[in-house]
Image: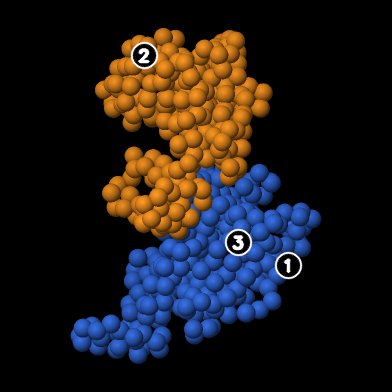
Chain colours: A orange, B blue
Amino acid sequence: METVAFEVENHVAWVTLDRPDRLNAFNDQMNRDIIAAIKRAEKDDDIRAVVITGAGRAFCSGEDLSGVQEDANFGDILRKRYNPMVQRLAKFEKPLIAAVNGTAAGAGMSLALACDFRLASEKASFIEAFIHVGLVPDSGNLYYLPRLVGYAKALELAVLGEKVSAEEALNLGLVTKVLPHDDYNASVQAFAEKLAGMPTKAIGLIKRYMRQSFETNLDQMLENEAFAQRTAGQTADHQAGIQAFLSKSKPAFTGK
Amino acid sequence: MSNHKFIRVWEENGIGRIELNRTKVLNAINRPMVTEIITALEQFDRDHDVSAIVINGGGRAFAAGADIDEMAGDTPVSLELLNQFAEWDRIQGIKKPIIAAVHGFALGGGFELVLSCDVVFAAEDAKFGFPEVKLGVMPGAGGTVKLTKAMGKAKALEWLWTGDSMDAAVAERHGLITRLVAPEVLLEEALAFAARLVQQAPLSLRLIKDTVNKAIDYSVYEGMQAERKNFYLLFASRDQKEGMKAFIEKRPPEFRGE
């Protein structure tokens, strides 16, 4: 992994986009590195939450336009580079946090949208930059944005392309929390550690089936809930939760 | 039950179980394995204690293709003389319900085995495909035929020509899958379905299977003639008398397959 740093601290993996001189813009290596980081986090049972953040002052400024040839086929670029990354993130069953430390623009915003939680620094901003260069939001942006903020607001953001401050993002429901810039990483780590200490399997099942709810009907969802509950009911974490409830103590979840 | 090399075979609660067991090569199907599978199927078909059969893959996949090394040196004449696909034809002779429980990859011969089953339970993470085209060949155990019958020419050609593998959700949309279930509960769900079949009248299951298979190939008229004969035939069974008597007496029937 050349363009991202991967570190694990107390069951939380930090995937840091590490091209600060380019405001962490995507190049094809970075698309691949993010996939590699997610695969690594999938395989490691010790990792129970993942944070994606940016080195330096930006979260991610989207595609590195300096690397794009004038005659490039953008459809192919998406299919080869971005779509596999977005699909990988969508299948990832552990909690995934975008720590939006600064600007999240274009595909950088899409990356944040593809995560489960967005923790914005007070200095963060979101911008649907695509329209300003005559392009269309991509990398799952058109899928996730209306689901997160509703159609009317999503269309407004995508078409007008105005910068959304952290505070505005909070009001829109686009971010979970706005955190002070001082001690930002420590606050993110605390939030991630809380998630890492929760029943990981149950979180994965919630993610899997809540995501499917957008594409299915009630009858199928009731079946899906039955699958999920049957599975969750057999986890050690369910037992730990029940024991703790009965003994009025705090459960120690192991993610198993 | 017996000394199989490439599969595990056992019986439980009226269900015949076959688990593909070449896990190191993702259950790639070789010729002796096909022979073992069909032999086990035929034994279950004759075993009065077995009412339904479930086939699943051990390890990480259902079956990711065929054993390429085994075929690389073949010639048309060697293949004609070996007549390896005749074994596959025998699967069509099995009269009892065969349920496939599929997770991970079902590619090439693995996909053909799925298409040879009657009912398919697929985990949401299952992937199906015919990659033969990438090796300069094509499916040889019914893949092209059964896929086309199931999804129609336009879609079947796309998958057969590209060799891409389709997600379980896509396979379900095209009618290849009976039920899509969470990977964690795949076997449990497939076995629960098999257990329901175990409760049904075995001769009914058998003649329904026969008639539905004919319906695929016959004209509506011929299919309906076949249906009628099977309908009449069931009136020769003890279970028909028991079933109707139990209905009138408002009690659950006790079927014996006689």
Q: Residue at x 60, y 16 (%)?
A: A19
State whether residue B198 is above or below residue A13. below
Left or right side of B96 for B250: left
Q: Are marks 2 and 1 on the same chain?
A: no
State whether residue A118 is above or below residue A104. below
Which chain is home to disc 3? B
Mark 2 and mark 1 residues within 8 Å of each other at the beta carbon: no
Label 1: which residue? B82
Q: Amino acid at mark 1?
A: Leu
Q: Residue at x 58, y 80 (%)?
A: B43
Mark 2 surroundings: few (<14), some (14-19) or many (≥20) residues within 10 A? some
Q: Which mark is residue A165?
A: 2
Whether residue B66 is visible, yes or no, is no
Where in the figure is residue B40, as x and y percent of width and height? Answer: 60, 75
Q: Amino acid at mark 2?
A: Ser
Spatial separation of the CA atoms under disc 3 and disc 1: 28 Å
User: Considering the image in quadrants, where does the N terminus of chain A appear?
Assistant: top right
Mark 1 surroundings: few (<14), some (14-19) or many (≥20) residues within 10 A? few
Label 3: which residue? B58
Q: Nearer the viewer, residue B15 or B94?
A: B15
Where in the figure is residue B28, as x and y percent of width and height? Answer: 66, 57
State whether residue B177 is above or below residue B37. above
Spatial separation of the CA atoms under disc 2 and disc 1: 72 Å
Q: Amino acid at mark 3?
A: Gly
Single out the mark in the foreground, 3 or 1.
3
Left or right side of B61 for B169: left
Which chain is home to disc 1? B
Spatial separation of the CA atoms under disc 2 and disc 3: 52 Å
